[in-house]
Amino acid sequence: MLTLGIETSCDETSVAVIDDQFQILSNVIISQIEIHQAFGGVVPEIAARNHIENILPVLDEALRKANLTLDQTDQIAATTEPGLPGAVMVGRVFGKSLANALNIPFVSVNHLHGHMASLRLSHADIKPPMLCLLVSGGHTILYQVNERWETKVLCTTADDAVGEAFDKVARVLGLAYPGGPKVSQNADMNLCFTPILSKFPKNTFSYSGLKTAVLNYINRAKQKGTSLNTAEICANFQYCAVLQLLTRTREYLQTTGIKTLGICGGVSANQYLREQFQVMCDELGVKLYLPKSELCGDNAAMIAAAAVLGIK
């Protein structure tokens, strides 16, 4: 069975085709990063407008790369929530229209479940039950996933998402959009520093306090005329941000006794995060799964995979 996936929840227009063995036949992505760089972030109306312009060429390219015609697909899946409303609507309406025209099933997919499915695309041996940490620009959520890929939220953020905090710190440091990867690239983790913030609320994630602590540190330095050490600030922030994820996830691994952990979402591409979680999982005897780097960000293959898995 062939599933055609569509992803337009933010600023990537993507169409992919996968089979029922989770083999990716094509996964075409057009990013709008260069368009939104001038604004320092995604402008929803501009994103939606570009999805409309890109969706047909991306579909054609995905079918060409898969060496298929549209009528050879068996079902169509598209992101229907969450995301920028106008952007999501483009993919949802386009996908439903195609499915109706072809008289094949249309599957609504939660974008967050799509990120979770990127783990199955990357690892054929992954088998729930497991804990799954989703870390992105808009979400920071720890799930418990049972054998049927049914999900239960164990912990979520009380305010900012970890990826959002990365982006805001980058912005105040004058680093180019998208800021999260720039913070990681500038962070010198070999420096010695006192953590700018090491305490955070129990039983939840929270990045508002850390973000504010970094901004206050920068503002005080500017008021005193002290030169800023960007490498140190980025390293300090990244250390504290990842420490919170490690601490909270460790607590739930020990409480549940589950021995499998998956991490997904855009921030899962962060190399420091990957290294630190591997150290923790080795210590606890937990098997760690991470997506392939090209599947960490938004893409349609993960949306198609979520439809095949039937994640709920």
Image (cartoon, helix red, strand yellow):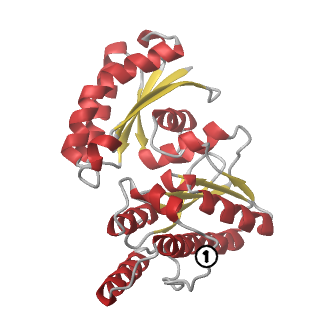
Frontmost residue, 251 versus 280: 280
Of residues 97 and 86, the one drawn nearer to the viewer in this rendering:
86
Label 1 amino acid?
Leu
At horizontal 38% and vertical 21% (from top left) the residue drawn is: 59
The percent coordinates of residue 91 (x first, y second) are 32, 33
Horizontal arrangement in the rendering, residue 296 relative to residue 39 (left or right): right
Q: Where residue 259 appears, x then y in whole percent?
A: 75, 60
Q: Which residue is mark 1?
A: 191
**Residue 5 visible in the displayed image:** no
Q: How many numbered markers are drawn? A: 1
Extreme residue in the bottom direction: 224
Q: x%, y% of residue 22?
A: 62, 30
Q: Residue at x 48, y 18 (%)?
A: 74
Quarter that holds the N terminus: top right
Residue 286 versus residue 151: which sits nearer the camera? 286
263 vs 294: above or below: below
Vertical comparison of 18 with 266: above or below:
above
Residue at 39%, 69% in the rendered image: 169
Decide: is 116 above or below 301.
below
Other-residue count near label 1 (Cα within 10 Å), few / some / many at <14 / 14–19 / ≥20: few
User: Left or right: 190 with respect to 89?
Assistant: right
Q: Position of residue 209 (x, y in %)?
A: 40, 80
Q: Secondary structure at mark 1?
A: loop
The structure residue drawn at horizontal position 48% and vertical position 55%, both measured from the top left corner, is 181
Say whether residue 285 is left or right of residue 168.
right
Camera sees residue 256: yes
Q: Nearer the viewer, residue 49 or 142?
A: 49
